[in-house]
Image (tube, helix red, strand yellow):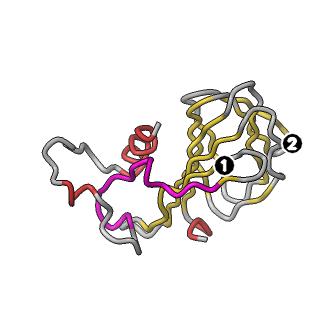
Amino acid sequence: MPKIVCGFAALLFGCGIVNAQTAPAAASTPATTQNPLARAGIFPYDQMAVRKTANGTESRNAFTGTLATGETVAVHESMQPAGTAPVELHRIGHSELIVVQEGTVAFEHDGKEERVGPGGLVYVALGTVHRIKNVGDVPAKYVVIAIGGDAKK
């Protein structure tokens, strides 16, 4: 699953093509812990900090950093088990792109509910009151890419 994070990030940020077979190991790590987006790098899935909640949801934080163009970007993967109660509707102070990896989720926003499955994208505009909930019978995994605004918090 980590390939979609890196692949989508490359598409979004224009990182270009990386030849991992000839790159030295030191070049594959982020530039600094203060700003992991200061230069090109990878973010191995098994090195992402995992946060687990009592109801079984998990979140893996990939990174938070600032692009050379000034936008703050924070990326994490979330997993919601089937049948788990969703988070409350909430308003965000940034924009989000959500890439569904596994399962089917409902995107509740603006008084409506839209469903999307693996490979689908959700765009959450700045200030949108929303939530994502697992509406399938298998765990739902998705990558959240928060951009700008309060994404650094």
Q: What amino acid is labelled 2 in the image? A: Gly
The residue nearer to you, when weighing 95 against 82, is 82
Residue shown at 63%/61% (left/top)? 94
Pointer 1 or 2: first along the chain: 2
As drawn, 56 above or below 92 = above
**Residue at the limit of the structure toward the bottom, as seen here:** 34
| Side (left or right) of 21 relative to 96 | left
Q: For the C terminus, give its image quadrant.
A: bottom right
Q: Residues within 10 Å of mark 2 (few under 14, many from 20)?
A: few
The residue nearer to you, when weighing 10 against 46, is 46
Q: Badge 2 is on which residue?
A: 111
Residue shown at 65%/28% (left/top)? 103
**What secondary structure predominates along the stretch shown in magenta?**
loop
Q: Secondary structure at mark 1?
A: strand
| Side (left or right) of 56 relative to 120 | right
Residue shown at 80%/39% (left/top)? 84
Q: Badge 1 is on which residue?
A: 124
As drawn, 30 above or below 81 = below
Q: Secondary structure at mark 2?
A: loop
Spot occupied by residue 77 in the image (x, y as percentages of width and height)? 57, 47
Spot occupied by residue 46 in the image (x, y as percentages of width and height)? 44, 48
Residue shown at 21%/44% (left/top)? 20
The alpha-carbon separation of the residues under discs 1 and 2 comes to 14 Å
Q: Residues within 10 Å of mark 1 (few under 14, many from 20)?
A: many
As drawn, 138 above or below 64 = above
Q: What amino acid is labelled 1 in the image? A: Val
The residue nearer to you, when weighing 37 against 50, is 50
Please give the label number shown on residue 96: none
Q: Which residues are magenta?
A: 36-51
Q: Quadrant of residue 102?
A: top right
